[in-house]
Image (cartoon, coloured by chain):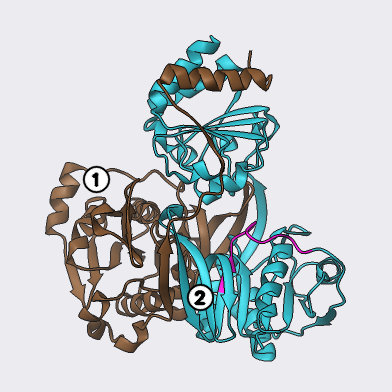
Chain colours: A cyan, B brown
Amino acid sequence: MTDVLAITEHRRGELRDVSYEIITAGRQLADETGGDLHLAVISGTVDEFAEKLNRDGVEAIHTVSYGEEFNHDVYTQAITQLYDELAPQYVLAPNSVNGLDYAPAVANALDLPVVTDTIDLETDGETLIATREMYGGKVETTNELEGEAVATIRSTEWPQSDGTGDASIEAFDADIDEDAIGSSVNGFEEVAGGDVDISEADVLVSVGRGIEEEDNIPLIEDLAEALGATVSSSRPIVDNGWLPKNRQVGQSGKVVTPDVYIAIGISGAVQHVAGMKGSDTIVAINTDPNAPIMDIADYAIHDDLFDVVPALTEEFQ
Amino acid sequence: MKILVTVKEVATVEDEFEIEGTEIASQYLGADLNEWDDYAIEEAVQLQEDGIADEVVTVTIGPEECEQTIRQALAKGADRAVRVWDDSLEGVDLLDVNAKTEILSGVVEAEDPDLVLTGVQAGDDSFAATGVSLAEEIGAQWGAVVNHLEHEFDDDLASVRRELEGGVEELTEIELPAVLTIQTGINEPRYASLRGIRQAQRKELDVQTLADLGVDESAIDAELTLTDMYEPESESDVTIWEGSAEETAAELGDLLRDKGVAP
């Protein structure tokens, strides 16, 4: 019997979607050997969260009431103590910025192996088989771990669980050592604001690394102007300071759902795809026919953007 | 203040490649300084230029061939470098997080830095876990996915921004000593100057074995075994437009007119 302890996530009073996805992932793993699925919800309004997390397939929800927001020291202490109490075979955490801020510490503290950013998990009760990507999504790999393990799951790879469950909701009295808390969260700031809201655009002309240098950005701006569209970009363009942060599409930028998304010189890293896959129609212009963006594109042009973009601009001028 | 920066030489893959067993065939692989580590080096060098860091030391786990990459970090301004390698690491096809944690903690013990900077992740295996695991191992504080670091360190605190999802940043204070994992975009990594490149040739590059660091060989036995590697199946039924740039642009133009989103 393989028991699973899955850690849920919330921010500023809201449960994040991955909390419902991790129920599905945890249930699937526990089902393979007839084990129990335990959830942990730590900090914030835990009782309110626990009610919402009480979905099909959850045996028990353990609430740790301590502080309002995420603090990795509190999470690490609470999870290691829950692990000692429940002795699950697997600990699952979201592969989120916060998940990556405690899961490796939990694994090291418990002397367990850790496997991150998994997109599929299987077990026979002894061996965990984790599927994950390498080389920016160019290959998938399977990885085996024996015995107990900590794994983080990529968001949106598992569907969100639904249905009302009959889990027991139990307050877990974690013994948090305050002297060991060495960091404090002092607030949050929205950084993707500004004059242009790319999430409102009907057509996005989105530019990536393939544009090569800042001097080439006007090529994209000219096309957007000819089309009456808005310019957005993938992360490296913003990192380079070629476009402001409010133009960034992706996990750490904005989620967009335009009628048409034209991805120009964008390879399609998973963090980018997370922000634009809800677009109605996706067109990719890229010289690399194997770029991950091709997996989600509806239309593709495998050609040099420096030839195609000016030709398209000319057509609409 | 002494800063230790982890620097990894990552494998890069050409657009077209073949897989042999659980590896990409070597003729399709290149090598490069890990992109995230480049930002970590830059942040450390800026701290030195601001008069806050006295010394910037890099550490790399890798064979002699990666010295070219280490020299890049030295050319950008790091003072000296440590490279860890051993025959026992030669045959390992994927060094997992625990093994890297053990090795790097040996280096931290020897160097005793106030601050360790690592890239958020490596561009090849993308674990994004070693920095936080290392912090826990050495009893230091940490912060993952840092995209801004104040250079004052008032009261021995690192004042950072952590880049959360959805355009939200968390403002956090972290006690030193600490390990920070550095996100791209935190700064603009410099190109090495010719002078820097010349100077880098003369900087100390110290090679250490596991025994030198007091790390037991069994500590690096991988707990994670790579069992298969394959190209992901495409789920797309993508329509590919072919022809000259004018022809494909015309196809895209027709689509945009059909959708009523272009003039």
Instruction: Tell me the element at label 1.
Output: loop
Part of the protein shown in magenta: A151-161
**Dot 2: few (<14), some (14–19), or many (≥20) neighbours within 10 Å?**
many
- Residue B75 visible: yes
Q: Nearer the viewer, residue A218 or A240?
A: A218
Image location of residue B138, percent across then percent down: 44, 79
Q: Is residue B251 above or below residue A133?
A: above
Chain assignment, label 2: A
The residue positioned 24% from the left and 69% from the top of the image is B82
Q: Is residue A299 above or below residue A69?
A: above
**Dot 1: few (<14), some (14–19), or many (≥20) neighbours within 10 Å?**
some
> Which numbered disc, 1 or 2, marks the residue closer to the eye?
2
The residue positioned 48% from the left and 11% from the top of the image is A314
Q: Quadrant of the N terminus of chain A?
A: bottom right
Relative placement, left or right, of A277 versus A313 is right
User: Picture quarter containing residue B236?
Assistant: top right
Image location of residue B23, percent across then percent down: 33, 64
User: Picture quarter containing residue A304?
Assistant: top left
The residue positioned 51% from the left and 83% from the top of the image is A112
Q: Nearer the viewer, residue A72 or A309?
A: A309
Q: Is residue B72 magenta?
A: no
Instruction: Tell me the element at label 2.
Output: strand
Residue designated by label 1: B192
Relative placement, left or right, of A62 versus A277 is right
Chain assignment, label 1: B
- The chief SS type of the magenta part is loop
Relative placement, left or right, of B212 versus B225 is left
Identify the mark at residue A114; answer none if there is no mark: 2
Image location of residue A244, percent across then percent down: 54, 34
